[in-house]
Image (spheres, coloured by chain):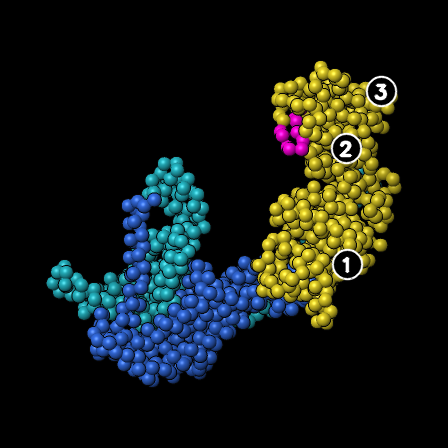
Amino acid sequence: MVDGTVAGDPPASAGTSGERETTAPTAIPYLLLAPSLLLLGLLFGTALVLLLALSLSPGAIPVQPGSSVRFLGNYVRFLADTYYLGQLAVTLEIGLLVTAACALLGYPVAYSLAKAPPGRRRLMMAIIVTPLLTDPIIRAYGWVVILGNEGPLNRLLLRTGLVDAPVKLMYNWLGVVIGLVHFLLPFMILSIASVLQKLDVALEEASLNLGHTRFGTFRRVLLPLSLPGVMAGSTIVFTLCISAFVTPQILGGGAIQMLPNLIYQQIVELYDLNFGSAMALILLVVAMGGLLGFQAIARRLWAEGQPS
Amino acid sequence: MYDVRLDGVSKAFGEVEAVRNVSLAVDAGNFLSLLGPSGCGKTTLLRMLAGFVRPGRGEVYIRNQMVNDVPPFRRNVGMVFQNYALFPHLTVAENVGYGLVARKISRPERERRVEEALSLVHLTNFDGRYPRQLSGGQQQRVALARAIVIRPAVLLLDEPLGSLDRKLRERMQVEVRQLQRTLGITTIFVTHDQEEALSMSDLVGVMNGGRLEQLGTPAEIYERPATTFVADFVGTSNRLDGTVVGLDGEESLVQVAGTRQHLRIPQRTGDAPGVPVSIMVRPEYVELTARGGPGDDAPLFGEVRFSAYLGASVRYEVELGEGASLVSLRPRGIDGGGYARGDRVGVRIAPECFYRLAGEPRNRAGAAAGVESDGAIPDSFANGPVGEAGSDEGGSGVGESRRSGGLVPRIGDEPA
Amino acid sequence: MRTGSLRLGSIATWAVLVFLLAPLVVIVAASVGAGGYLTFPPQGFSLKWYAKAVTTEGFVRGFRVSFLVGLAAAAGAAVLGVGAAVAITRHRFPGKAAVEGVLLAPLVVPHIVTGIALLGLFTTLRAPYSLWRLILAHLIITVPYVVRTVAAGLHDQDPCLEEASLNLGRTHLQTFLHVTLPLILPCLLAGSIFAFIISFENYIISVFLAGPSYATLPMELYGYMQYITDPALAALSTMLLAITVGLMLALDRLFGIDRLTLFR
């Protein structure tokens, strides 16, 4: 080191001792956030903690005496009962089925939407968004009219001679799935389209130019690049699907009980807030699991690179 | 009187040191350009003056008032943003009058001053339009009018001409400079365009890696770059490395690396056989002669590797030997029909056009800071990095004007 | 260049779009039927079910409750959401990631869970039935939507505009009122409209919290549907659909229909 011969600026090493300050922290952001945090953090947060507490208290049906699990009685009751587990399985099955159906039906629409000229694009957006903004009860009600024994669909089937007697199209899993697909399809379409429309047209043209067919281009270029949109859409659709109440309630007609319908029953009809709370938390865990699961799959797909 | 003075300011964003120990001062009425590649810290420096960034260390003075803790809205500093930042929901007149409302200026007076400012930027009768109805050049003028109408102590321009096309840009350069002269506003102009910086300014500060590498008049910056970085960044630099092989009176004889050719350059104290030398010359000073033709007594010779027709001039790249080549810019027509690839040519450079860089060998050239703690390099070679400033002539403290333009000099040495 | 696969794709697209519109079209058509049952295609033409819909006491009362709660939630969410959005887009502060998580949490918690949790809370606090319970609950689920839209608007807005205002001598508050707010107003309105729709259409949270005297319109709709099958419900639905379309057009004007991908 040079000792004192270099006057002027201190050596660069001295600079590291200087303050690494960003803008000085002020109270302003906290003041701006205070009302929201009070509502969402304190009120909502407390409610969720209380939900956990309620679920740990014994429900209307007491736990078997001598049971080793004192606090988890409600959970044990759910997890040891094949009926509830069966309904949970039905919920998950319908969730996956609806998600897959939305992806398959939504992709071509999203693609057309992304490629459509502005005028047609607005029309398509209006057609997609209008049901999204319509009350789910009204939408399910429309399907009740269409799918009923006297409904237009059954009449069409009878008239064409495809069937001899009206087909049962609702108050079974089919009606629930149709209703849920209708309920959730817009989310999938918008999610995929938002990714597709950001893709450079030149990528597709380059693939065609290099000799791939349209299908080859789709498989090798579009699909891998739009997979994040599909996965994001699937995450939304799956979590909303297993949490849906109105649509399965109306179109299932009691024959199909998804988890939210069972929870509603416990609380509104059986007044068992404790067991209902436990089921609600199970639903929350399943929904979160779905969320994380789909995200993990998405990440895995990315990590593996483009599927060949 | 200085309108702007920075005293050892530094700023780090997390691990990134955006500005490192910069000191400078600008006289009232002067036009200073801060020139450097993106990320060199020039915009951060400008934002410090505007009050959007607080210096981590050091002090910022505007008109002798320390403003480190003065919020932006009390600084009276006019700023033209890179993308103009015109309020899209306000008309041209409302945009220009925006700062006057904050200053509680009465309506008639405000209207008068807005009109005056708009006429200064040649936008009379545009007052009712919205920014989106204006062209890029017109938006730029509105931004300028908005910044000067508040009669700021300092005008800050953050690459305001960057998004204009070449023709318009050149016209705006002239207009901005004329306006600045007319109003006599102390101005700091940030740009990465060296031509713009050289043509518009009283003074140019070249920045790199958060440091102020050199501060000087445009001519000083161009002809006597203090560091390799400045030499490379401003203009096309031709660099030849070599070794002193002999001394001859006032001159040193240098063997150009990679060749057997020798070059005479003005001698400097400390020159002795074996001392490495780096010299720089601007392409327009590199004369070419036809090999074997009349007047062929050129000290160097080489072979034309490329020639590029540039309109008014022709650019040649001449290879002197392995790893040694020079670029020559010749006015079209001067050397007859010019040279073609493969032609062997004589190369001549007038001794006064050589500029010797600091003694660092090439591989250290980029790391200006590297010289600081290295005592092995003789003082006479240490005319480069900012870190060495003040090592001769008894230090150059802040507040002492030594160079034309009234700037506190940060660069210690005069070139060879 | 038209190829077979392309045409197949566009047929599939329009088939899906028909599927999306089908239940809405059926309801609108059935609402003007003259018969006492809901049928499609409708038999005869009559507007009498519209008359019945607007005079059915439950519908009128439910509409009033839902409209009030929706307006209150939208207004409250606007105020809370703007503050929160400004904080997370324009400020740096410790714990920001956690705060963002809290702000968006109501979006990932199923509404039925939110409803039961709040039912538990209000029951424990012995809070009496009132509109406030509904408004607070709806505020919780709508604030995230406003935060998202407004944050998107702030994100797209050049921060230089605010700096220019400060530079020209306006304080932070003046800058917010004269520059930031006017420029994000469309996004704010769009977010509020969305908040209103979310609140207005909510069934599952209201059903836990409303109690008998504050039944919302979706609760009335669902209740009516259980017992009566006349087209009055379709008439009411058609009117609500008209409001929805109107709001959608407003959303398009304010925010751009394309950007609705943000919502869920």
Q: Residues within 10 Å of mark 1 (few under 14, many from 20)?
A: many
Residue A213 percent location from the top left of the image = 33, 40
The colour assigned to chain C within the rendered structure? blue
Direction from residue C216 to residue B314 in the image, left or right: right
Foreground of the two, C227 or B138: B138
> Label 2, on which residue?
B358
**Which residues are drawn in magenta?**
B308-318
Q: Which of B398 and B203 is in front in this view?
A: B203
Whether residue C116 is visible? no
Chain of the residue that carries numbered disc 3 in the rendered image = B
In-image side of A177 versus A121 (left or right):
left
Labels 2 and 3 positioned on one and the same chain: yes
Marks 1, 3 in one chain: yes
Q: Quadrant of the C terminus of chain A?
A: top left
Q: Is mark 3 on a helix, strand or loop?
A: strand
Looking at the picture, which amino acid does disc 2 mark?
Answer: Ala
Q: Which amino acid does label 3 sit on?
A: Asp
Pointer 3 residue: B248
Q: Residue at x 29, y 49 (%)?
A: C7
The span from disc 1 to disc 2 (Cα, nearest Å) is 38 Å
| Mark pair 2, 3: CA separation | 21 Å
Please indicate whether residue A218 sits to the left or right of residue A22 in the image. left
Is residue B314 shown in magenta? yes
Q: What element carries label 1?
A: loop
**Image quarter hosting the N terminus of chain A:** top right
Position in image of residue A202 (x %, y %): 44, 43
Magenta portion: prevailing SS class: strand
The reply to whether dot 1 and dot 3 touch (C-beta < 8 Å) is: no
Residue B103 within the magenta-colored segment of the rendering: no
State which mark lies toward you, 1 or 2: 1
Numbered circle sitting on residue B153: 1
Count the marks: 3
